[in-house]
Image: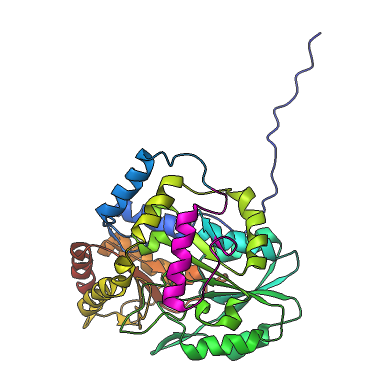
Amino acid sequence: MNSPSLPHLTPTLRTRLPLVGTTVFTRMSSLAAQHGAVNLGQGFPDFDCAPQLVELVSDAMRAGHNQYPMMTGAAPLRVAIAAKIASLYGHLYDAGTEITVTAGATQALTTAILCCVHPGDEVIVIEPAYDSYLPAIALAGGVPVLVCMQVDETGYSVPWDKLAAAVSSKTRLIIINTPHNPTGTILRPADVAALADIVRGTQILILSDEVYEHMVYDGVRHESLARNAELAARSFIVSSFGKTYHVTGWKVGYVAAPATLTAEFRKVHQYNVFTVNTPMQYGLAGYMADPQPYLDLPAFYQRKRDLFRDGLAGSRFTLLPANGTYFQCVRYDAISQETEAQFAEWLTAEIKVAAIPVSAFYAQGKESGIVRFCFAKQDETLRQALERLRSI
């Protein structure tokens, strides 16, 4: 018996992220490729990592480290991470119960949000903000509460009075990012003290995005929240081997948090990623035996920052301070009155240098007449871009 023919139906799906489309990084990188532009937009190096690191990963493969590691991360790497944090910031995390290796920092950030934010909980986000924060909050059913940084000729800063005013009985989490992407701002001791004053006596947790921890310049130290025992006791602290060792495509990071927070983090981690590339973990553990590569990183990137800033001196761009990260923000009001997106597209198509509009880091696309360049590039790449930018 033949069934009657039925019309072809395409299932419909109600989106969990109605405000999310293609990222600005994808769009600008595609535009850069289309126009043959120097891509100073997306934040990744155009140079290789240390050959020794590649050899250590290859050695781990040959040694048979090719099956699942522990869900929490390979023990030698967790031990090395705990030792590094203790050495740099004076806080000893237990490698067994307080360090988890993740599939990059973005997974760590998302997992931290998912494990502690319940529907209706409020999460304070400082804008401009890295673009993964708001979608992760939405997936958790949380409510973002946005606090805009102040910006003037001295650069960006967090208005702690406004952040304190944003705290309510529903506040579950505050997201901190230092050094800050996209602005290049760093938190100072007074900022950390202000944050501690705000959360003292509350049940508020902190998610501290510190992926650029080794890119702080001019002799200033990185103010990791791990340095502050009061804040470390309520914080998920996230970092990234991709940023530190020039291997962004490896997607390996970690989160350090007190045991009670880590236990909840791991409940989500074991089901949204389970575990992370085994030979890379063993290779990274071996490479961390020598701290010099990350101790040398501030000087390495400061030289590139200075090359880029010196090259733009006297141009029609106005440089904002760049105290950390590998990003340089500039004002372009002496060149154009276009929106940031329009200017970035013109810069890519006509001048052949790609940048990122800072407005893309605001939920409502706030315009400040500022774009962001990435200087994590070979010197020759930077010189080529500078020649084009100075021609404006």
Residue 112 location, quadrant: bottom right
Residue 202 percent across, percent down from the top left = 71, 82
The total number of labels drawn is 0
Picture colour scheme: rainbow
User: Farthest right residue?
Assistant: 1
- Seen in the picture, residue 317 relative to 37 is either above or below; the reply is below
Quadrant including the C terminus: bottom left
Residue at 29% x, 68% y: name it: 292
- Position of 251 with respect to 306 (left or right) is right
What x and y, as percent, mark residue 242? 40, 59
Taking the image as shown, residue 305 lies to the left or right of residue 126, namely left
Residue at 24% across, 78% down = 306
Task: Specify whether residue 194 is in view.
Answer: yes
Q: Residue 239 at what x, y percent from top left?
A: 47, 66
| Image spot of residue 124 (x, y percent) | 63, 76
Residue 162 in sight:
no
Q: Indicate the quadrant where residue 320 lies.
A: bottom left
The image quadrant that residue 126 belongs to is bottom right
Q: Nearer the viewer, residue 235 or 229?
A: 229
- Rendered position, 267 above or below 387: above
Decide if residue 207 is on the left or right side of residue 210.
Answer: right
Q: Is residue 73 above or below residue 358?
A: above
Which residues make up the magenta segment? 70-99
Rendered residue at 36%/61% (across/down): 288
Q: Quadrant of the N terminus?
A: top right
Is 82 magenta? The answer is yes
The answer to if 86 sits in the magenta stretch is yes
